[in-house]
Image (cartoon, grey):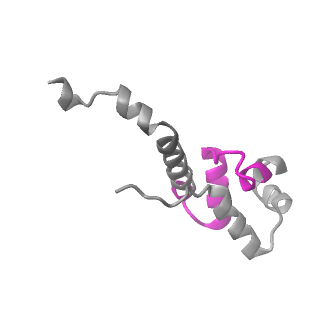
């Protein structure tokens, strides 16, 4: 059974966290030591969270970098599955089918 929930971009989670802290994207970026546009693009779901950003956010929030990377990976996988799975099913033969 396939999960029909829409994919959640990590930027949505980050937005909720920053709103709860009443912290602007610019102030957050300054705390992380990154350009403000990096954070703004993540918040607007136009940019992925990189390992560098995940490490910085883990330091700021007291979480693990893996938490942020796992959010990004889950989002990427869900999007790719929605966009490409039919094509992949048709073009890739499972190992057991090759026997």
- Toward which corner of the image does residue 19 lie, by quadrant? bottom right
- Left or right, 88 with respect to 59, comes to left
- Whether 76 is drawn above or below 71: the answer is above
Residue 52 drawn in magenta: yes
User: Residue at image x 72%, y 64%?
Assistant: 15
Looking at the rendered image, the quarter that the N terminus falls into is bottom left
Residue 20 horizontal/vertical position (percent):
73, 75
Residue 29 horizontal/vertical position (percent):
80, 55
Numbered range of the magenta stretch: 40-67
Residue 83 horizontal/vertical position (percent):
52, 40
User: Residue at image x 54%, y 45%?
Assistant: 79
- Whether 21 is drawn above or below 66: the answer is below
User: Residue at image x 48%, y 36%?
Assistant: 84
User: Residue at image x 39%, y 55%?
Assistant: 2
Q: Is residue 35 visible?
A: no
- Whether 66 is drawn above or below 79: the answer is below
- Left or right, 2 with respect to 77, comes to left
């Amino acid at each position: 059974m396939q999960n029909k929930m829409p994919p959640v971009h990590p930027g949505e989670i980050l937005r909720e966290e920053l709103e709860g802290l009443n912290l602007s994207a610019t102030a957050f970026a300054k705390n992380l030591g990154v350009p403000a546009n990096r954070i703004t693009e993540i918040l607007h779901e136009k940019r992925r969270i990189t390992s560098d950003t995940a490490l910085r956010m883990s330091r700021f929030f007291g979480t693990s970098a893996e938490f942020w990377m796992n959010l990004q990976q889950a989002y990427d996988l869900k999007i790719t599955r929605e966009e490409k799975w039919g094509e992949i099913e048709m073009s890739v033969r499972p190992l057991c089918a090759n026997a």
